[in-house]
Amino acid sequence: MEAGAPGGTCPTSPFHFGNQSRISFRLTRWVLVLITICSVSLARAHNVGLSIATVHLQTNALQTVVAFAMRETEQIVSLDADHDGHVTTNEFFAGREMLAAVVAEKCEVHFDGKTVKPDRISCELEEGDRVDVILDYPAPRFRELQMSFPVIQQLAPGHRMFFSLINPAGESVADRLLDAQNDSVSIEIGTPSAPAPAEPAPCTFVDFLKLGVEHIGTGYDHLLFLFGLLIVTRAFKSALTVITAFTLAHSLTLAVATFNVFTLPAKYTEPLIAASIVYVGVENLLRHGNPKGRWMLTFAFGLIHGFGFASVLRDLGVGSNGSGVAMPLFSFNLGVELGQITLAVIVLPLIWKLRTKPLFVQRWVPACSIAVALAGTYWFAQRVWFGG
């Protein structure tokens, strides 16, 4: 008789399957918890600290406007008097003189090696919770302008400051991307009335390329969105279609927003990005396998993610004050793409290898999709109700 054919040693025996199910359930549960905790703890990590230093050359004068997001001023001077996590207008006006004084002390200006102090300091609150510290310097005839911004040292690790020198004609003649390790510039300028510096500004192509790679590398919400899309792909063609659709979409809105054709405020884009993550996680659970028409969904949500990428360049002041747009836009977007491709090359072969195992498809893909949806839900709640 063949009753023993499916005997006790068969992998599909009730005892073996039950034991495997219990083990896989425990593993799935813990991985789900770990992924969720990691995603939540890194929720804010992709918000790269950005500030702007715009220097206007004028006849016998030089004006520097240093702009910060309100939340970043807390790392310089605490304006939140009641420590409720929110700086009110009254709190800002109560502490703005102290803030301006500290920023002025940590923004150094030298004309031909001679230190110059500002003869007028002011601090204003602009639209969108942006704080402008305005420093006016007397500027006699000089040949070399040296400026350093040690204030960057007080800000979060990874903070960037976009430096732009504007001539009397209102044209940007020198741009730099500064950080804690490189917080100074030195430019041969002739005199304040000279329309252009004597030496060309070094190209910031590599700086913006690195910023693009860094932004996608620490953009955990963007990465989680892509992970949710790719974990259900079965072949190179479907993965390529998804990545291409996402790239084309966010490149389009990145350009549109950077050129100021149309912009979408962060208070809308950030919750929508979180919502896209939730949707992808839930769709993975409801539509088993590789959902058809995924590229259309990816393209639609990619448009929203592009506005999120654009906020980085807008925060840096790219395109404002006569500064060039094409080079920063191209190099930043190229950096984002290089980061995405690198991660896809690493992750996709592993996903495809794991998908050959039925247990991974049955247990781990749903578990990861649940983790994606939960992380997206957390971000959505945080950004809608807590302004995170």
Image (tube, rainbow, N blue to C red):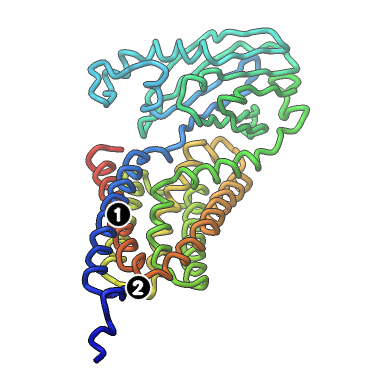
Q: Is residue 256 visible?
A: yes
Please give the residue where the numbered disc 2 appears in the rendered image: 289
Quarter the N terminus occupies: bottom left
Please give the residue where the numbered disc 1 appears in the rendered image: 27
Structural distance between the alpha carbons of marks 1 and 2: 22 Å
Residue flagged by tag 2: what amino acid is it?
Answer: Gly
Which circle's residue, 1 or 2, is located before the other in the chain? 1
Kindly identify the residue that appears in the image at 36 percent across and 34 percent down.
128
Give above or below for 323 relative to 367.
Answer: above
Please indicate whether residue 297 sits to the left or right of residue 335 in the image. Answer: left
The residue mark sitting in front, 1 or 2, is: 1
Kindly identify the residue that appears in the image at 63 percent across and 32 percent down.
176
Task: Check contact, mark 1 vs mark 2: CB within 8 A.
Answer: no
Question: Which of 38/282 is in front?
Answer: 38
Give the quarter of the image for residue 232: bottom left
For the residue labelled by badge 2, is the local secondary structure a helix, a strand or a loop?
loop
Please indicate whether residue 307 sits to the left or right of residue 151 in the image. Answer: left
Residue flagged by tag 1: what amino acid is it?
Answer: Leu
Q: Quick one: label 2, few (<14), some, or many (20+) residues within 10 Å?
A: some
